[in-house]
């Protein structure tokens, strides 16, 4: 009786072998429909993925540096689109490159090597020897000798002038140092109301302070009042001018300084013995300088000759006629 099918049977059997009802048949048909839709969607996804993989392959980067360099070498210049694609495929597929080796050598692209230019040499020696390069001498632009160009800037001329200036400056300083070391005899008189004339040999570069210190040491044996006096309290008066301590004898010689009664650059005693004086000729009288104590000057500055004394100023011209009055 198991093979007897009832009217209205669904044709679906259970696991136990019994014929299922119409509801089970409906569920079975829905499941088959869902499986069919799933399979169609799966095929659609695979088709989409296959198309995208082709696009990615077309745009993927080539990591093989050697094949990429070979491709660039083969596509130098104008290349047709078909030839470009073929060479791209050959570079991507090494097998295709082997197949291209069968082509004649005339059709293959050969790299063009640039030849390095060598200097022309007429030597009989071998070419393997190293060629020594000579320094390039820059030729000076020639100028017309008949045109005055001294007003134009010239770098070489300015450098030459600067070197000559430095050289002359050094020579001048050396000459001045030599002059400062020369000896000169200075006649002076220690003045304490009376004159006590002495002579002292010094160098021209000696300052007034150094001169007064030497005088104090030499006179302290004969004049006891100078033993306790410092150099700052001594004064040197030349031609009625009080010479500051920082001035040197060299300064007065070089500048040809003049005092109120004679030149400051003559340190001896000189009298003008001309019978007839000519105002157009400079007088050559020179008087010995005076060394005195500042305290004596402060006490007797209103009495001649201290009333005539004033501080030396290089900017003041001393061309006036000498008088015994304080004018």
Image: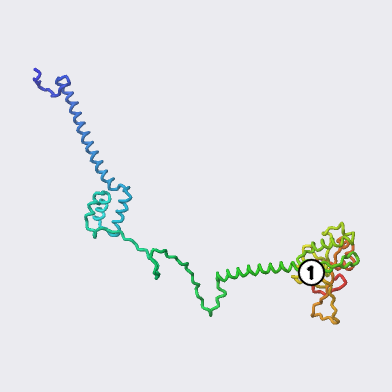
Relative placement, left or right, of 190 versus 206 is right
Say which quarter of the image contains residue 214.
bottom right
Q: Is residue 170 above or below residue 36?
A: below
Name the colouring of the figure: rainbow
Relative placement, left or right, of 69 versus 208 is left
In x, y percent, where is residue 19?
14, 21
- Looking at the rendered structure, the number of numbered marks drawn on it comes to 1
In x, y percent, where is residue 236?
83, 65
Residue furthest toward the front? 125
Say which quarter of the image contains residue 326.
bottom right
* Residue named by callout 1: 184
In x, y percent, where is residue 290?
85, 67
In percent of the image, x 16 and y 23: which residue is there?
Answer: 22
Viewer-side residue, 322 vs 190? 190
In percent of the image, x 26 and y 49: which residue is there?
Answer: 94
* The C terminus sits in image quarter: bottom right
In percent of the image, x 30 and y 47: which residue is there?
Answer: 60
Say which quarter of the image contains residue 112.
bottom left
In x, y percent, where is residue 82?
23, 55
Residue furthest toward the top? 1
* The N terminus sits in image quarter: top left
Viewer-side residue, 250 vs 131? 131
Residue furthest toward the right? 194
Mark 1 residue element = strand
Q: Is residue 319 above or below residue 247?
A: below
Viewer-side residue, 185 vs 237? 185
Crowding at label 1, few (<14), some or many (≥20) Cα neighbours within 10 Å?
A: some
């Amino acid at each position: 009786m198991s093979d007897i099918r009832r009217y209205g049977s669904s044709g679906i059997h259970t696991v136990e072998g019994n014929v299922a009802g119409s509801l089970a048949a409906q569920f079975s048909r829905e499941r088959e429909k869902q499986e069919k839709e799933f399979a169609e969607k799966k095929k659609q996804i695979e088709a989409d993925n296959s198309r995208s993989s082709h696009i990615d392959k077309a745009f993927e980067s080539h990591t093989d540096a050697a094949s990429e360099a070979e491709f660039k070498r083969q596509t130098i210049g104008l290349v047709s689109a078909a030839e470009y694609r073929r060479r791209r495929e050959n570079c991507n597929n090494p097998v295709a490159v082997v197949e291209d080796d069968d082509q004649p050598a005339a059709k293959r692209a050969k790299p063009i090597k640039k030849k390095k230019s060598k200097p022309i040499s007429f030597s009989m020696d071998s070419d393997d020897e190293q060629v020594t390069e000579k320094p390039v001498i820059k030729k000076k632009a020639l100028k017309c000798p008949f045109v005055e160009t001294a007003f134009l800037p010239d770098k070489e001329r300015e450098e030459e002038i600067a070197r000559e200036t430095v050289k002359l400056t050094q020579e001048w300083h050396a000459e001045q140092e030599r002059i400062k070391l020369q000896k000169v005899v200075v006649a002076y008189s220690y003045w304490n109301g009376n004159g006590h004339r002495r002579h002292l040999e010094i160098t021209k570069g000696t300052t007034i302070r150094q001169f007064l210190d030497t005088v104090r040491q030499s006179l302290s044996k004969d004049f006891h009042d100078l033993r306790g006096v410092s150099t700052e309290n001594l004064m040197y008066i030349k031609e009625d001018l009080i010479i500051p301590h920082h001035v040197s004898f060299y300064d007065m010689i070089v500048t040809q300084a003049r005092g109120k009664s004679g030149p400051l650059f003559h340190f001896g005693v000189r009298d003008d013995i001309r019978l007839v004086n000519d105002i157009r000729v400079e007088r050559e009288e020179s008087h010995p300088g005076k060394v005195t104590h500042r305290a004596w000057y402060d006490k007797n500055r209103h009495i001649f000759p201290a009333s005539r004394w004033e501080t030396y100023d290089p900017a003041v011209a001393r061309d006036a006629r000498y008088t015994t009055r304080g004018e």
